[in-house]
Amino acid sequence: MLRLTSAIAGYSLMALMSGCVPTPAAESSLNVQPLPVALGESSALSCEHGSLWSLNDSGNKAEVFQLSFSAQLQRQQALKLTNRDWEALAWAGDVLWLADVGNNDGSRSELQLYGLNRQLKPEQRIRIRMPESSSLPYQHDVDFESLVYWQQQLWLVSKSWKSLTARFYPINSSAPEQSLPQPRYEVTLPFLVTDASAVPGTDQLVLVGYAPPQQRFWQMIQGKFEVWMALLDGEGKLIKQQQLPVDTQVEGACVDPAGQLWLSSEVGYKPASLYRLLHW
């Protein structure tokens, strides 16, 4: 989750005045629906088992939400866990992994993943030890908002405030204690990655996020974001990237079996919303 005032304060005046070359938004068939009020800070999205799945991030209760594809609340499951900064979730077969991995200030010594069964009961936990860091808030590459099951493997994808180079870290779901491994793939993008989704029936991966604050300063003061997506092949190489016709704080993304791209946004200058893009 982006805390706007803190993020902007972390950049120098020179960075705030830097610009970027605008890219036309993708022509898409876009459908927008409000999310339930209880999901006002949706920070993740998964399209699995015939439903949408989401959660709220830091400062909210430890809950998982199951939604219909028309954004109707089907289940709101309270969990006896701690939500320090939940930022992502991913189904891996019959296990729903919740990712307590937000690290805006770069100070976390460990991250946590929680594995729930199909009844949404916690059964597994993974502790991931982080390397020592002396970075300033929002000026490092060890913040995470994306967990994805891709290539029969769990991956954490870095948000990478400093370099805009998203790095893919393979996670061993059978090891309850592990150190953050070396990244296997990396790709430099014009945006901060806030979620990722495998594309069903292919080996491709979609990354979604928004342009960094120093490139959209005045728009973000108004609460508006420049939202992007990237499509990668099975070797983590970029196929395409494009701006999307959405201007809210998109934190969740998933691709359904029909190939539709779904996005969830936090409440801002518009209500928290669910977006469906038929063509992207």
Image (cartoon, rainbow, N blue to C red):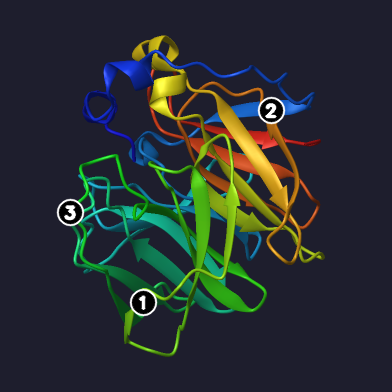
Which residue is label 2 attached to? 31
Which residue is label 1 attached to? 121
Circle on res. 256: none
- The three-letter amino acid code for the residue at tag 3 is Ser
Residue at position x 26%, y 68% in the image: 131
> 100 above or below 274?
below
Residue at position x 53%, y 42% in the image: 72
Which quadrant would residue 162 be assigned to in this image? top left
- Between marks 2 and 1, how big is the CA–CA gap? 33 Å
| In this rendering, position of residue 53 left or right of residue 136 | right
In this view of the protein, which residue sits in the foreground, 165 or 207?
165
Which residue is label 3 attached to? 134
Which quadrant would residue 272 be assigned to in this image? top left
Q: Is residue 45 visible?
A: no
Residue at position x 20%, y 60% in the image: 108
* Residue 134: image location, x then y, percent: 17, 54
Q: Which residue lies furthest to the front in this view?
A: 14
- Between marks 3 and 1, how big is the CA–CA gap? 37 Å
Query: Quadrant where the N terminus lies?
Result: top left
Mark nearer the viewer, 2 or 3? 3
- The three-letter amino acid code for the residue at tag 1 is Lys
